[in-house]
Image (spheres, rainbow, N blue to C red):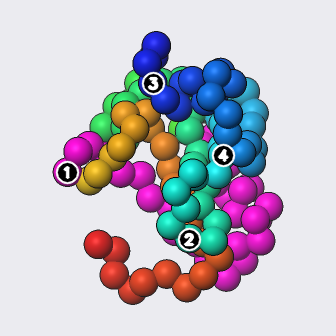
Amino acid sequence: MENCLFCKIIKGEIPSARVYENDQVYAFKDINPQAPVHVLVVPKTHVASVSEIDLLSDEDVAACLRAVSLIARQESLSGGYRVISNCGPDACQSVPHLHFHILGGRRMSDQMA
């Protein structure tokens, strides 16, 4: 998508702190981290959110989840981590490109909201 922030990051038009990349996925550090480890995992194919995940191939969806697991090991999150995907304005999704937040490096709150 032409004006999508994450598409521009994937293309290298906007700099990012890359953590992981393969043919289907790009992962980078969040510029406003909410935990000691805060990485965003995005499919290279543009879809707006989980609501459109059926537009991705099964391989692309699996690649995102495999990347989450690989990055968690790479970042030494053996004590646990949280994976979040905000979906739409009521969930405060700030960039309309499907992405998964990996949050870890400290004990998370017992509450989800």
Q: Quadrant of the C terminus?
A: bottom left
Label number found at residue 35 = 2
Residue named by callout 4: 28
- In the picture shown, does residue 89 fall above or below 45? below
Residue 74 pos. (x, y %): 79, 61
Say what secondary structure mark 1 lies in.
Answer: helix
Instruction: Tell me the kind of residue under disc 4.
Output: Phe
The answer for how far apart the CA atoms under marks 3 and 1 are is: 20 Å
Residue 8 pos. (x, y %): 57, 24
Residue neighbourhood size for the residue with mark 1, other residues' Cα within 10 Å, grouped as few (<14), some (14–19), many (≥20): few
Label number found at residue 90 = 1
| Res. 50 visible in picture | yes
Residue named by callout 3: 4
Residue neighbourhood size for the residue with mark 2, other residues' Cα within 10 Å, grouped as few (<14), some (14–19), many (≥20): some
Instruction: Tell me the kind of residue under disc 2.
Output: Ala
Q: For the residues carrying marks 1 and 2, which lies nearer the camera in this image?
A: 2
Say what secondary structure mark 3 lies in.
Answer: loop
- In the rendered structure, which segment of residues is drawn in magenta? 62-90
Instruction: Tell me the kind of residue under disc 1.
Output: Asp
13 is within the stretch colored magenta = no
